[in-house]
């Protein structure tokens, strides 16, 4: 029983599952490389073009495939072996990183090549992300431990987010962007090996390609007909579109407002990663999913207010502190939303619902990137951040008016599954 854990064992209870330990160890290495590549890409694009719009364009091309392909990935995740899908997507992502490294190290890289390879990676991630979200349940046998696993996944993501950008800033300054791409490619070997070593018992259901549209419709009707899922997805969608696009303007802030360089950008993103890591530790310590409906809008307000104040800062240490708060608010809001949705979703529709979460979380990002890049070109980075932060606060306040319904659904779900652990 998961509720017999105490102290540190309770905090790390998802590690009692061998498959999860393998997944965690492989992913944290791979994700560190991924964050190094992300920072290297945005810095390289800005160095080559000095254009905030092109920064937004590259962000758009890397994420827009998620908007179109995630629903298909969700159907596949409910009917095919998720572990094998992840091995394929991780192998292709490794190939993309090595191609990027080869072009950069031979001085053949250009914004055009970055756009092409960003589209390629975007297609890979469109299939990888929703499958990876649903894969958590294949590693965690007890539903009561699901929230802890999701929180630890987020802590893993943000530990990498803390380390990766900081390493990237140092490596870019010393050796150039190409080494970051090369190291990212090598890092994928860790997660591929972990997946190969796993033995999972996923419950698969019969699947025929001709039924694809029927399965897609079934998932959409379920998710948007269930108000708690619908409201939560809407908030995640808005934050992805308006809130998370702050990353696009960070190179502009680092260089033009704070007068820094690639190291400054790395420190800013690292501070956001530290804040997000603190947030996931906070969530991992939560005993149940009850109360998360309150945490979601509260953390969203922290994010919005911190982003507004950050827009006025010209002092590095203050900017770093505010980025810590930004990272905390964003990650707590997203991870808590993820946990709420997975807690109340029927198991046989989990892949399709999580594909919609992925569309909301990542699929709207490209539109936000274009919007933020274009807006920054017109009115500047500071004013863009003020607008985005203010809109996020308004969205959080509107969501808070629906907390009662979500709370009732979580409590009902807990009562119905109390005897299953």
Image (spheres, helix red, strand yellow):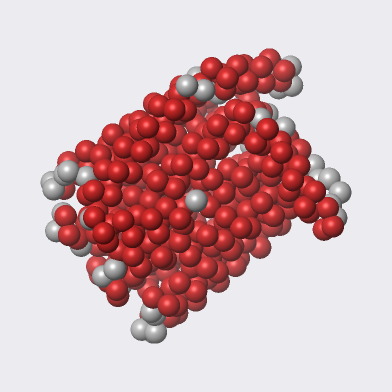
Question: Between 195 and 270, which is closer to the camera in this rendering?
Answer: 270
Q: Residue 327 sits in which quadrant?
A: top left
Q: Is residue 119 rendered to the left or right of residue 18?
A: left
Tell me the quadrant of the picture where the C terminus can be found: top right
Residue 279 in percent (x, y) is at 40, 33
Q: Residue 5 sits in which quadrant?
A: top right
Tell me the quadrant of the picture where the N terminus can be found: top right
Looking at the image, residue 387 lies above or below residue 164: above
Residue 215 in percent (x, y) is at 78, 47
Is residue 414 visible in the rendered image? The answer is: no
Residue drawn at 26 percent across, 43 percent down: 386
Residue drawn at 22 percent across, 38 percent down: 309
Looking at the image, residue 335 lies above or below residue 67: above
Residue drawn at 58 percent across, 19 percent down: 405
Question: Between 127 and 142, which is closer to the camera in this rendering?
Answer: 127
Q: Is residue 166 rendered to the left or right of residue 297?
A: left
Most extreme residue toward the front, as rendered?
378
Is residue 333 visible in the rendered image? The answer is: yes
Question: Between 402 and 118, which is closer to the camera in this rendering?
Answer: 402
Q: How many marks?
A: 0
Residue 16 in percent (x, y) is at 61, 33
Residue 322 in percent (x, y) is at 24, 39
């Amino acid at each position: 029983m998961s509720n017999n854990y105490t102290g540190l064992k309770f905090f790390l209870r998802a590690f009692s599952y061998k498959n999860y330990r393998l997944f965690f160890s492989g992913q944290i290495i791979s994700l560190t490389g991924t964050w190094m590549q992300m920072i290297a890409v945005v810095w390289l694009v800005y160095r080559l073009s000095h254009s905030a719009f092109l920064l937004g364009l590259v962000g758009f091309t890397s994420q827009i495939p998620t908007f179109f392909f995630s629903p298909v990935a969700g159907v596949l995740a409910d009917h095919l072996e998720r572990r094998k899908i992840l091995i394929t997507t991780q192998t292709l992502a490794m190939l993309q990183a090595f191609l990027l490294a080869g072009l950069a190290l031979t001085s053949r890289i250009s914004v055009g090549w970055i756009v092409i390879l960003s589209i390629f990676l975007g297609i890979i991630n469109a299939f990888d992300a929703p499958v990876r979200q649903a894969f958590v349940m294949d590693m965690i046998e007890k539903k009561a431990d699901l929230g802890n696993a999701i929180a630890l996944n987020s802590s893993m993501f943000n530990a990498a987010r803390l380390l990766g950008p900081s390493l990237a800033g140092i490596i870019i300054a010393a050796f150039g962007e190409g080494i970051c791409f090369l190291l990212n490619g090598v890092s994928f070997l860790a997660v591929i090996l972990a997946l190969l070593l796993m033995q999972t018992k996923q419950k698969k259901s019969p699947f025929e390609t001709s039924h694809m549209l029927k399965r897609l419709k079934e998932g959409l009707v379920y998710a948007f007909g269930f108000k708690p899922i619908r409201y939560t997805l809407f908030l995640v969608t808005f934050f992805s579109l308006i809130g998370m696009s702050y990353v696009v303007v960070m190179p502009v802030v680092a260089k033009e407002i704070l007068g820094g360089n690639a190291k400054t950008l790395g420190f800013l993103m690292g501070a956001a990663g530290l804040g997000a890591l603190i947030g996931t530790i906070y969530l991992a310590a939560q005993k149940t999913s009850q109360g998360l409906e309150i945490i979601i809008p509260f953390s969203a307000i922290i994010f919005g207010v911190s982003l507004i104040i950050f827009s006025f800062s010209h002092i590095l240490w203050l900017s770093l502190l505010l980025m810590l708060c930004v990272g905390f608010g964003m990650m707590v809001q997203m991870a808590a939303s993820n946990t709420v949705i997975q807690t109340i979703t029927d198991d046989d529709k989990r892949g399709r619902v999580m594909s919609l979460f992925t569309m909301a979380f990542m699929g709207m990002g490209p539109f936000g990137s274009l919007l933020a890049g274009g807006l920054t070109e017109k009115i500047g980075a500071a004013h863009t951040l003020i607008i985005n932060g203010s809109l996020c606060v308004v969205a959080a306040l509107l969501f808070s008016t629906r907390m009662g319904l979500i709370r009732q659904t979580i409590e009902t779900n807990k009562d119905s599954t109390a005897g299953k652990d």
